[in-house]
Image: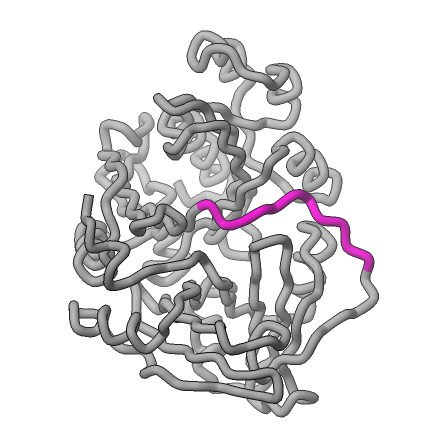
Amino acid sequence: MNSSATDFLPLNGTDHIELYVSNALQAAYFYQVAFGFEPYAYKGLSTGSKEYESYVVKQDKVTMVLTSPMKGGTAAGLHIDKHGDGVKAIALWVDDAEHSYKETIKRGAVSNFEPKTIEDEHGKVVLSSIKLYGDTIHVFVERKDYKGVFLPGYKAWNNNLKTEPVGFKYIDHMVANVDWGEMNTWVDFYKNVMGFNQLISFDDKDISTEYTALMSKVMSNGNGRIKFPINEPAEGKKRSQIEEYLMFYGGSGVQHIAIATDDIMHTVSTLQSRGIDFLTVPSSYYEVLQERVGRIDESISQLAELGILVDRDDEGYLLQIFTKPLQSRPTMFFEIIQRKGAKSFGKGNFKALFEAIEREQAIRGTL
């Protein structure tokens, strides 16, 4: 383990995720109605922002910023044109944004913007930012001197829409898809520039089906609050899900956001009732589930009905399920995960999951 991980870049958690989307107002409505996020903050014409409009939605510790351009030719507009709706910024909550910036730049990070202080009547926030894979960025957020809603420049937003949370708690991990041969480049970046440790590694023998393969390594910060699996394609007979993502996204980017829940049965059944589509596995998966994972608290017939997958490691077990893509392009999706001791990422489910993705790819004509 890299003992210096907690020394030069202490991270308190994920502050927020910013998505660039073509219609922030409608996207915010979708995340409120379907996923139960609450309206939280707004920035736009009425707050003095002439170029971008942002709606911020929140559920427990998960905060999402949905940003759209209000005129042509903006950086966000060009991002959307290239990638479609997707994650632009993974914002990390730190005690010292200037220190975080200097330490990562010193170790080889490329600057996105230098430390800057933004303020309003509620106090000040210090932000800094470094570049990541593709057009993705990390933003360091220091908010200890701020008492207002979200960030300076935003105002509280309440649209009188009655939202019902689905049980989201926090972001468990976020997965990147990177281009051929780039996985180790970004593994080294997280190790050397940000002081992360490699938790786990999967190669194409671990993650392959009859047709497609991929490789993956999981990076984690010192206190384990931030985890980033990084995937790259591997040679297979047909086009893998990673290749499909790279083709439609126009390069490397965030493939999925895994959100933790304490009651996956409730979360998934609620989401399904609100029209969210999930990947499904054949019923044969559940016929051998008991012998593969041993005794679990949940009813296997209920798991089968909802399509929830189960895997066990030395520490316990986990339950997980994956939505279908949440925008027009077959790119970003959500994972819902409940950990019952397990620290791993569902290796035992990879084959079933990727075969499910391949069935969707075949329907899309992109396999």
Q: Is residue 182 something one can see in this rendering? A: no
Indicate the quadrant containing the C terminus: top left, top right, bottom left or bottom right.
Answer: top left
Indicate the quadrant containing the N terminus: top left, top right, bottom left or bottom right.
Answer: top left
Q: Is residue 13 magenta?
A: no
Residue 74 drawn above or below residue 263 = below
**Magenta region: which residues?**
162-172
Judged left or right of residue 290, residue 277 is right
The residue positioned 81% from the left and 62% from the top of the image is 161
Q: Is residue 300 something one can see in this rendering? A: yes
Judged left or right of residue 272, residue 342 is left
The residue positioned 36% from the left and 28% from the top of the image is 347
- Foreground residue, 259 or 135? 259
The residue positioned 18% from the left and 50% from the top of the image is 184
Judged left or right of residue 243, residue 269 is right
Looking at the picture, how far across and down is residue 212, in whole percent?
Answer: 31, 35
The residue positioned 43% from the left and 81% from the top of the image is 75
Residue 158 drawn above or below residue 286 = below
Residue 100 drawn above or below residue 173 = below
Question: Picture quarter containing residue 346?
Answer: top left
Residue 325 drawn above or below residue 67 = above
Looking at the picture, how far across and down is residue 41, in whole percent?
Answer: 66, 72
Question: Picture quarter containing residue 43?
Answer: bottom right
Q: Which residue lies most toward the top here?
A: 291
Looking at the picture, how far across and down is residue 50, in whole percent?
Answer: 59, 91
